[in-house]
Amino acid sequence: MLALLFLFFWMKALRWQMLLEPIKKLSVSQVTPAMMIGFMGNNILPAHLGEFLRVYVLSRQFEIPKTTVLSTLVLERLFDVIAILVYLGIGIYFAPNLPEKYHSISLFVALGIVVMIIAVAAYLLWTEAVIRLFSSIFSYLPFLPEKLTHLVLEMMRAGALGMASLKSKRLCFGIIWTSFAQWLFNGISVYIALWSFNIHVSPLAAFVVLGVTAFGVIVPSTPGFFGVVQLCFSVSLEAFGVSNADAFSASIYYQLSQYFPVTLIGLYYSNREGLKFSEAEREAENELEELEGGEHEVEAVRESG
């Protein structure tokens, strides 16, 4: 489990390094501290505030505009969603002993993959047109806060800088294969957690659990996603005839095997970078506030482009 965890985060760091390369050439070892501090933040802070902590640390270390750093994280999520959807679709369609209705679900997953790929391609090729489309859509949704819609549109403009890595065939290929590789390792970790508690299911079931869990933790929740992971394991394994008690046990093992190493490594890097534990939440919240009202950051990104 620890070896797979190492490979998972090494792949994440390698991919982030490639996403950042058109902006600033950094090594894997240079981006790792900020990345691990961010994931540590997600473990101890609510509502994914660790992502903004990650932005703060890398921006401070290498003087990269914060909005630009955040744009690479947005791209990370896009590629994560595509890779996870692929594994989820494969798991649902090919896993044995699943009711026929699940095959229909896999077709909807496949449709989601196609839509995501088309959306990313359109955003890359016709950035301003896509932004104008979203602006028109927002104008028909008056219940959305103006501050929120403004932030989304500005982030989409800034995100075009992060898309620069996709214009390089070498970087694009590297980003794609590392995205699939890291989630393959995570899926194997899920399978080992199930196997460790004598839950005998197809390895494809692990990819179903992976997909459901990965989407479950996207929603801002408690620090470390405790409770959310347990629910996702139970819901996804129910279709394979696994009892809630067994699913709960495996989910705890899977979660803690990642929670403690990631948190400890993140705290180590946090201490090394001079970021005290008591300051972590404040800095993350400050970054969120700055990005919400950060006209000056967006201007800096445009000028650097």
Image (tube, helix red, strand yellow):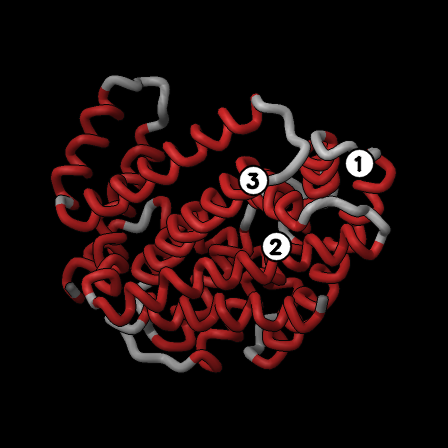
Judged from the image, the secondary structure of the residue bearing numbered disc 2 is: helix
Q: Is residue 220 visible?
A: no
Q: Looking at the image, is mark 1 or mark 3 earlier in the sequence?
A: 3
Residue corresponding to mark 3: 94
Q: Count of labels shown?
A: 3
Q: Which residue is label 2 attached to? A: 187
Position in image of residue 124 (x %, y %): 19, 50
Mark 2 or mark 1: name the one nearer the start of the chain: 2
Q: Is 92 drawn above or below residue 210 in the view shown? A: above
In the image, residue 276 lies at what x, y percent? 63, 70
Marks 2 and 3, how far apart in space?
A: 15 Å
Q: Position of residue 233 (x, y in %)?
A: 71, 40
Answer with left or right where residue 101 lies relative to residue 302: right
Q: CA distance from mark 2 to mark 1?
A: 18 Å
The residue wearing badge 1 is: 242
What residue do we see at 28% from left, 75% from top? 24
**In the image, which is nearer the foreground, mark 2 or mark 3?**
3
The answer to whether residue 195 is left or right of residue 103 is right
| Three-letter amino acid code of the residue under disc 1 | Val
